[in-house]
Image (tube, coloured by chain):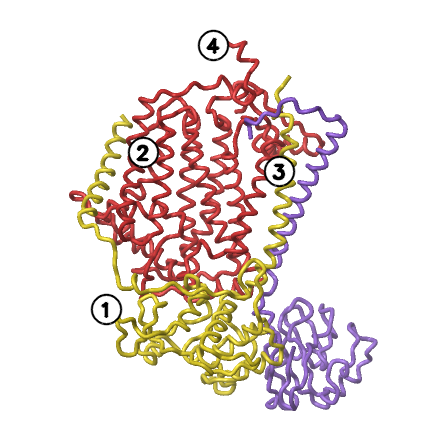
Chain colours: A purple, B red, C yellow
């Protein structure tokens, strides 16, 4: 403290003393910086989804009531999912498209499960800017290609929910899912 | 505003020059907490608590903003949203525990800061404005802390809201309507919780504003010092940067160490278990107390147990509780001793230590149940508290013979001051 | 002038206090209640989660959970705990799911929208023991069984309190005044604040059978439940203690470094000038 005046301290060799002093100051400031930066970790990660939100990451849907040609909207991770029971005509139509000509080339088979090719399960979230496309409900526009149509910016999806026209860059996303039984599908 | 030997800000880079001509922000920083602010070289560690209080304020604001992202100010879900923060939000438990214990640490630091002022006469001319703003800050802090305590909507929160707003009902005529206006109802409810949340978010920024004024006012005369002798020459001061930045820096490290120790290993030590029980308007906990930093004032409130002539005891207690802080505003004019530091005031120093003891007693009694012997003890301590500021201080400052002061700060530190020989003896 | 006024105001407050003090002394009486005399502080309890290096004993938590599930849950809710949280007790995903399925939670009929129940999922919270306070009162001789999620933080020395209370039922001492003897539907327990508790002794030896072969004495079950409730009150306890050590270590290091830096910066100012 202020009173403890050090008298007759032996003079340090000037150069040596200065260097050692600089080193300790630089070290102190750096360590403080490291400390400051590491406190950013909790301050930033607190905004990521919390444990209860992450836990809601799978959902089971009963599909027994969906007749051929119909579609429903289910909820998965607080977002809508289309579950569509494709007609044979829609399947044929989707398979006739030249895959190479597509913006996001994928076959219907790649977008469905084996032997369950009539069940097309996709996120109901337009890959452009996230609106919910029309086409699942009775009488809604299904766009120029008979699948889904996003009215926000005019993206048209075909019967395999692949992007065909409009600004969206990708096909509607297919979430992970599995059939728990013939009538119950588990998404996520 | 500063001493003539203060370092002048010289922009080192053309950009800084450009900036300085248009918005001299770097210059402001340089002159307030940089090398441009000369500080008495003899400041002891009691002077570090102002900087620590600033660190506390920053911690509270940062963690508070984060908690507000997850907290829901609605009486049906507030309690659950706090548990959501504790259980599910990433690092939410840390944010909440730092905020809760940080508030306590803030008060520890500010109490030391205030008592530093009492001992060293920091409130005296020419620093009255620094002191007055400081008292305003303390009042704002108390209001903010109280409203923050209500937010988790536990039993203690609810009953704190009820009891503290009940203080206003002691005011004759307007008391009852005033309490209902404060609560937005007949008892604390959703309206109360929502307005307290809004104000709890607002007041810290008001505090920031007053802190700026507090520091501004401080920079006009410059910091006081343990001898109370004004700065006379350049050898009395050192620049704030790097000298006091280094000193404040390492003590902040030590302070954070203690804060972290409590936060990680005894996070509920300073809290009350009843606040982990959801608010229940139907039943009051057996022993309600405010958070510990209000205990001295709570003890003063409860010390008035008998009607005084025509004044009801309830009103007397409320007057005394608010008065006990408001009298600090008068301090610069009650203590007219020309000597600032208690180090050179033998008589005042004794009374200062008695005040410390009285304050400690009030602390203890405020947290104890409202039963004997605590009531009698707190009455004696509270009587001393008022007598100290309002009676003893004016009298002592008139009759005391102070010890001889050093010629200058430099002489106090080094034992001699060359310039002393050159100037005529006083 | 201001000082004369201040002395008058000071006299006003001190005289008022002296007046209170005087009347207080005339009626001075130290509090004495039966509760003061017969109430006992909790017995000592040491858990694996105590101390700076404390960790939960998962085996014990599972036993405690079993006691909660088979005994306490009949009356006491655990509303802040979700089935998914039980993974922290060492259960795997399938076991958590199996536990959840064992509970019925509130739901709606997907076709009619009527309120109904469905089997629990890991994301669900433990269902409430009673739909509301009125029902809880009606079923429990006018006493509401408190939620247990935060119990060990909602009482002083909570874990020891739970343990002492559960294992502390006894016959009222002979010296206990008639007014404080347990009435109809009340049970004497010196660890409870007002000595008489509406909860009948919930545990007796062998009421549960532990899978790990631990003998289910009242003592053992009380400890296990206390440990389990420490976890429900603060599931992040372990993480908190583990994070604390490096943080404290770092701060200590940084403070020492800062102190050395401070010393070196002030070195020339502490020297007497020649």
* Res A65 → quadrant: bottom right
Where is mark 1, residue-wise? Answer: C177
Q: Is residue B179 visible?
A: yes
The residues tagged by marks 2 and 1 sit, at their Cα atoms, a distance apart of 48 Å
Q: For residue B359, which numbered disc appears in the image?
A: none
How far apart marks 4 and 2 lie (CA) works out to 36 Å
Residue at 72%, 81% (x, y): give it. A160
Residue identified by numbered label 4: B425
| Badge 1 density bin: few <14, some 14–19, many ≥20, Cα 10 Å | few
Check if mark 4 and mark 1 are on a common chain.
Answer: no
Label 1 or label 3, whichever comes before in sequence order: 1
Tag 1–tag 3 contact (CB < 8 Å):
no
In the displayed structure, does residue A137 sit left or right of residue C114?
A: right
Q: Nearer the viewer, residue B99 or B379?
A: B379
The residue tagged 2 is B388
Query: Relative to residue B297, is residue A155 depicted above or below?
Result: below
Chain where mark 1 sits: C
Residue named by callout 3: C259
Q: Are marks 4 and 1 in contact (CB under 8 Å)?
A: no
Q: From the top left corner, tell me how far across and down residue A11 is, in percent.
A: 71, 24
Q: Residue furthest left?
A: B309
Subunit of label 4: B
Chain letter of the residue carrying label 2: B
Residue A79 appears in the picture as rendered: no
Q: CA distance from mark 2 to mark 3?
A: 38 Å
Residue at image point 46% right, 44% down: B108
CA neighbours of label 3 inside 10 A, class few (<14), some (14 to 19), many (20+): many
State the SS at label 4: loop
Instruction: Give how far across and how far down residue A123 sits, in percent.
Output: 66, 76
**To which chain does the residue with label 3 belong?**
C
Residue closest to the eye, B238 or B70: B238
C26 on left or right of B183: left
């Amino acid at each position: 403290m202020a009173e403890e005046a050090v008298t007759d301290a032996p003079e340090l060799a000037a150069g040596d003393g200065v260097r050692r002093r600089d080193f300790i100051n630089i070290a102190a400031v750096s360590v403080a910086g490291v400390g400051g930066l590491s406190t950013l970790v909790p301050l930033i990660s607190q905004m990521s989804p919390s444990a209860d939100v992450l836990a809601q990451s799978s959902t089971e849907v009963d599909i027994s009531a969906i007749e051929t040609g119909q579609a429903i909207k289910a909820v998965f991770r607080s977002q809508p999912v289309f579950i569509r029971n494709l007609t044979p005509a829609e399947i044929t139509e989707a398979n006739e498209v030249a895959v190479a000509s597509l913006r996001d080339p994928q076959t219907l088979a790649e977008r469905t499960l084996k032997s369950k090719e009539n069940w097309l399960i996709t996120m109901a979230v337009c890959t452009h800017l996230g609106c919910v496309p029309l086409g699942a409900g009775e009488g809604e526009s299904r766009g120029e290609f008979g699948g889904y149509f996003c009215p926000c910016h005019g993206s048209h999806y075909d019967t395999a929910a692949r992007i065909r026209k409009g600004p969206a860059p990708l096909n509607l996303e297919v979430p992970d899912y599995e059939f728990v039984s013939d009538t119950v599908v588990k998404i996520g | 505003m500063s001493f003539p030997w203060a370092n002048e800000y010289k922009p080192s880079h053309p950009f800084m020059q450009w900036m300085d001509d248009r918005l001299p922000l770097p210059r402001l920083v340089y002159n307030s907490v940089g090398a441009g602010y000369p500080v008495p070289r003899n400041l002891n560690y009691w002077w570090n608590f102002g900087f620590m209080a600033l660190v506390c304020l920053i911690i509270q604001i940062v963690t508070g903003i984060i908690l507000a992202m997850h907290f829901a100010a609605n009486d049906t879900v507030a309690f659950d949203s706090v548990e959501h923060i504790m259980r599910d939000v990433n690092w939410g438990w840390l944010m909440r525990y730092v905020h809760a214990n940080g508030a306590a640490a803030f008060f520890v630091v500010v109490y030391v800061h205030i008592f530093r002022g009492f001992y060293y006469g920091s409130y005296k001319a020419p620093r009255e404005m620094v002191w007055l703003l400081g008292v305003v800050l303390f009042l704002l802090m108390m209001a903010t802390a109280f409203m923050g305590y209500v937010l988790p909507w536990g039993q203690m929160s609810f009953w704190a809201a009820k009891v503290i707003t009940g203080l206003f009902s002691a005011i004759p005529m307007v008391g009852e309507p005033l309490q209902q206006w404060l609560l937005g109802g007949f008892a604390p409810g959703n309206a109360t919780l929502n307005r307290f949340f809004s104000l709890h978010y607002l007041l810290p920024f008001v505090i920031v504003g007053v802190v700026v004024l507090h520091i501004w006012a401080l920079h006009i005369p410059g910091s006081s010092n343990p001898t109370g002798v004004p700065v006379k020459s350049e050898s009395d001061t050192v620049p704030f940067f790097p000298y006091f930045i280094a000193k404040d820096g390492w003590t902040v490290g030590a302070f954070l160490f203690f804060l972290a120790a409590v936060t990680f290993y005894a996070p509920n030590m300073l809290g009350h278990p009843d606040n982990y029980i959801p608010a229940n308007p139907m039943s009051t906990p057996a022993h309600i107390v405010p958070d510990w930093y209000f205990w001295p004032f709570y003890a003063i409130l409860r010390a008035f147990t008998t009607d005084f002539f025509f004044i009801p005891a309830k009103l007397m207690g409320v007057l005394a509780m608010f008065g006990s802080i408001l009298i600090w505003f008068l301090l610069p004019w009650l203590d007219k001793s020309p000597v600032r530091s208690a180090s050179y005031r033998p008589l005042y120093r004794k009374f200062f230590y008695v005040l410390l003891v009285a304050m400690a007693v009030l602390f203890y009694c405020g947290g104890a149940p409202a039963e004997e012997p605590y009531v009698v003890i707190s009455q004696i301590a509270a009587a001393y508290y008022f007598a100290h500021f309002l009676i003893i201080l004016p009298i002592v400052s008139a009759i005391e013979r102070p010890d001889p002061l050093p010629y200058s700060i430099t002489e106090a530190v080094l034992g001699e001051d060359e310039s002393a020989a050159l100037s005529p003896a006083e | 002038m201001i000082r004369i006024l201040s002395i008058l105001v000071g006299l006003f407050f001190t005289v008022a206090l002296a007046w209170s003090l005087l009347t207080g002394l005339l009626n001075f009486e130290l509090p004495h209640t039966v509760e003061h005399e017969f109430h006992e502080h909790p017995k000592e309890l040491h858990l694996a989660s105590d101390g700076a290096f404390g960790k939960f004993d998962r085996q014990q938590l599972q036993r405690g959970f079993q006691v909660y599930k088979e005994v306490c849950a009949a009356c006491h809710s655990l509303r802040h705990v979700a089935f998914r949280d039980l993974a922290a007790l060492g259960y795997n995903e399938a076991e958590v799911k199996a536990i959840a399925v064992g509970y019925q939670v509130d739901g709606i009929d997907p076709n009619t929208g009527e309120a109904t129940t469905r089997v629990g999922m890991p994301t669900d919270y433990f269902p409430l023991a009673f739909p509301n306070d009125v029902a809880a009162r009606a079923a429990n001789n006018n006493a509401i069984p408190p939620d247990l999620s935060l119990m060990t933080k909602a009482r002083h020395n909570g874990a020891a309190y739970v343990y002492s209370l559960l294992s502390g039922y006894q016959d009222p001492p002979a010296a206990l005044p008639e007014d404080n003897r347990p009435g109809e539907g009340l049970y004497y327990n010196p660890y409870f604040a007002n000595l008489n508790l509406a909860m009948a002794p919930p545990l007796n030896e062998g009421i549960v059978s532990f899978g790990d072969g631990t003998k289910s004495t009242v003592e053992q079950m009380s400890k296990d439940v206390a440990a389990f409730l420490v976890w429900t009150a603060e599931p992040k306890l372990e993480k908190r203690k583990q994070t604390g050590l490096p943080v404290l270590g770092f701060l200590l290091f940084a403070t020492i470094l800062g102190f050395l830096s401070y010393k070196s910066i002030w070195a020339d100012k502490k020297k007497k000038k020649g």
